[in-house]
Every structure is written in structure tokens, then in C-alpha cells.
Image (tube, helix red, strand yellow):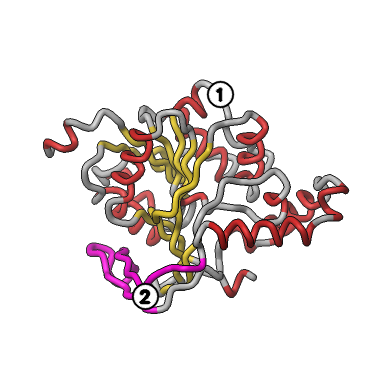
Amino acid sequence: MPPDVKKCAVKFSIITPSFRNSEWLKLCIASVADQQGVESEHLVQDSCSDDGTQEWLPRDPRVQAFIEKDSGMYDAVNRGYRRATGDILAYLNCDEQYLPGALKAVHDFFAQNPQVEVLLAGSIVTDGEGKYICHRHALVPNRRHVWFRFSALTSSIFIRRKVIHERGIYFDTKWRDLGDFHWVMTLMKNNVPIQARNFFTSVFADTGENMNLKPNAIREMKEMAAMIPPWVRRLKRLWIFNHRLRRIRAGHFNVPATSYDIYTKKSPARRVEFLVSKPTAVWWNRT
């Protein structure tokens, strides 16, 4: 074990829910396994996939594999959180990856901010081949804005162990696709200390097959919309405008030229560098 890891008192537990995503899961695992300067465990909760995952996952020494039926993604994440032994927890879906140095940056943030229990960082959005789409910065959620603009991607949310194991804020498994929204609402209701930072930890692949584009997600979005307080709904345009002002003040639209390194289906064993000469904070195909 490298000396810098021995000195690190904080351990990460990364949970990945998995179902019939064998090729994406391999990339996700690789992106966690090559993180430097931190101690981590990677728990994969696979719901008895029949796409070949079971042929290799139990033998992968980089992960702890639990192959068992669950009642959906959020149930799988909850199971992983219960098994987690780390101080900092996160969940990373199969079609997501961590960027090099991501967990070390998160470790340093929590070490410098002991009062914070939830960190919201930024994610880079790519297509299924790893090509750039946009940057997605995070904002601390606002109780009114959050109904119309979710302020972070879950690939870049990191929490202290106490959020789960002391406060008991697990995902509500009633929701199959919008559990993240309701979980964040619970964080706010419980006044959990949250901060957002403009550094980027993760990559989300917008494949066109993501769960939040499927019929059940659309149904849950309609159900969520019916829960919006009438006075909040009436001022929807104001909240969206205020949200945009917050993004402008936070510098979200001033992204310099950059690059990122990820695993791809064509290069599952080695990260590939992608150069971005004209970054954008606008996710055009989701506007």
C-alpha cells in the first residue's frame, strides 16, 4: 500500500447498482480501481443479471460483488450503504465513471470542512462513445428551485457515513426513478449541511437509454409535479430565472478549455483523453 494511502484516515465506500449493464460496469469499476491516494471499497449490487455479468463479476478482485434480487436501483443502493464500512459514501451507476484524482479531491474537501455532511461536485456529460456534451456544475439545492431544476448529478454526490448510519436517510424505494429527488428533499427537511464545489469528479454517459428517459420515469415526474405546492407552481418562471442567476453568479457559464480522461467501450483497459476546446454548461439535448 502506497505511503500516502497509509496516512489517509478516511475510507470511501462506492456503491454501484447493476442490472444487465455488463460492458458499462467494466468501465465503471476500472474508474474506481485506479483512484490514487485514497483507501476505498467498491460494492457492486447486481440484481442477478443474465447478460454475462455473473460470468466475470464474482471473480473481479477489485470489487465486492453481491448478486441478489432487489426491488430496484434504490433498494440496491440502500443494501450497499448498509454493507458499507467507509467514512465517505457515494453511489456510481454503471454508465458513470470517476475522473482521475476525483476521490482524493473529495477526501481533501471533507478533511478541510468537517462540518459538511454532503458534497455536491460537478460532472462531465458525454455520449455513449465518450464524446463531450457539456459540463454540469452543482448548486446547493433551493427548496423552491428544486421542483423545476435539480441542482446536481448523483455521480458527483458524496456523503459522510452519518447521513445514512446515524440520520437514517436512505432512499425511499417507493420511487424507481426519482428517488434522488426525494432523497435530496429529505436532506433539506432535516437541515443536513450541504456544500457545492466547482471541481469535477465524474462523468455521466448520456446513452439515450438512461432510466430517467423511460416511461416509468415520466410517470413519476408527473406524480412529482402534482406534489408541487400551488404557490410555488404559480411562480415557476421566477424560480427558474433565479436558478439561472445563481448559476451565472457561480461562474457556471465560464468554463475554460479543458480535457478529460475516461475508459470507453473501445478502450476498456486504458483511459482515453478527450480535448474540449469549447466547453459549454448547457445540456442542449435535455433543454
The kind of residue tagged 1 is: Arg
Q: Main secondary structure of the magenta part?
A: strand
Residue 56 makes an appearance in the image = no
Does the stretch in magenta take in 144?
A: no
How far apart are the two marked residues, 1 and 2, measured between alpha carbons?
A: 41 Å
Magenta residues?
253-277
Name the quadrant of the C terminus: bottom right
Tag on residue 110? Answer: none
What x and y, as percent, mark residue 68? 47, 38
The 10 Å Cα crowd at callout 2, few under 14, some 14 to 19, many 20 or more, is some
What x and y, as percent, mark residue 254? 47, 68
In this rendering, the label closer to the viewer, 1 or 2: 2
* Relative to 22, residue 10 above or below: above
The kind of residue tagged 2 is: Val
Picture residue at 46% right of the left edge, 60% below the top: 204
* Relative to 5, residue 147 above or below: below
Q: Which residue is mark 1?
A: 167
What x and y, as percent, mark residue 198? 44, 54
Picture residue at 31% right of the left edge, 49% below the top: 32
Picture residue at 47% right of the left edge, 33% below the top: 116
The reply to whether the C-beta atoms of the residues labelled 1 and 2 are less than 8 Å apart is no
What x and y, as percent, mark residue 281? 51, 68
* Relative to 256, residue 97 above or below: above
